[in-house]
Image (tube, helix red, strand yellow):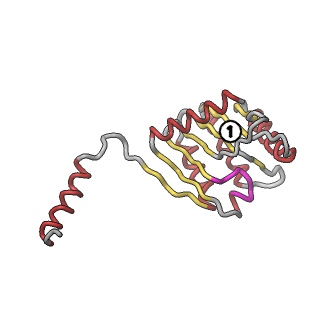
Amino acid sequence: MFPTGSLAILILLGIVSVGCFKDTKEYQEIRFVSNRDYYPAFHRLAESSEESIAAVIYLAKFHKAHETQVNMILDDLVSAKQRGLRVRVLLEESNWDSSLNEYNGEFIDSLEKYDIAASFDGETITTHAKCVIFDGESALLGSTNWTTSALEYNNEVNIEIHDEEICAEIEEYINNLWEDK
């Protein structure tokens, strides 16, 4: 066991060495995003994006009659497209759930009205993923579908990631799904 003075010196050296050997790239960050925090995180990331937004979502269901957070996500995607960003959304197409196809089809139609690339995945495999990549540098992924229930009532868990290597892998995953649709 180290004497108290030596232990303090070792701890101090550890703290100093972490600062000295810190990676020179931009600080990497992961944040926990749960329940009602999803839309504010999505909105912040969408507004700060400068090049692209790509999403893979299992279910997107908005309401034409009143404003919901799903409608606000749609508005954020439209705004990004109008700012000149490349925006793509891939949604699940089910071979067993016609109501899911109806909801996702309506969302796709709404995106296409604004010249946003939107599509179903392939019908033969279930794409249950829920992930969005912003500028290839930030990602939001977890359990949240783009539904009023998920965004405003359910217990959901997600993470927001700011790590170029991980985000590059997520973007490659989304690109592969997009190509295989």
Which residue is labeled 1 in the image?
Answer: 78
In the image, residue 144 lies in the stretch drawn in magenta: yes
Number of marks drawn? 1
Q: Which residues are magenta?
A: 143-150
- Quadrant hosting residue 173: top right
User: Few, some or many C-alpha atoms within 10 Å of disc 1 (few <14, some 14-19, many ≥20)?
Assistant: many
Magenta stretch contains residue 51: no
Q: Say which of 65 and 131 sits in front.
A: 131
Q: Residue furthest right?
A: 98
Q: Quadrant of residue 165?
A: top left
Q: Amino acid at mark 1?
A: Val
Question: Residue shown at 76%/35% (left/top)?
Answer: 120
The residue located at (81%, 39%) in the rendering is 105
Position in image of residue 91 (x %, y %): 73, 40
Q: Residue furthest top?
A: 179
Report x, y in % for residue 76. Answer: 65, 44
Residue closest to the far bottom: 4
| Above/below status of 149 relative to 111 | below
Q: Is residue 22 left or right of residue 160?
A: left
Task: For mark 1, give the secondary structure.
Answer: helix
**Residue 63 in the image, given as x and y percentages of width and height:** 80, 51
* Image location (x, y in percent) of residue 15: 24, 58
Quadrant assignment for the C terminus: top right
Residue at left offset 17%, top offset 69% = 1
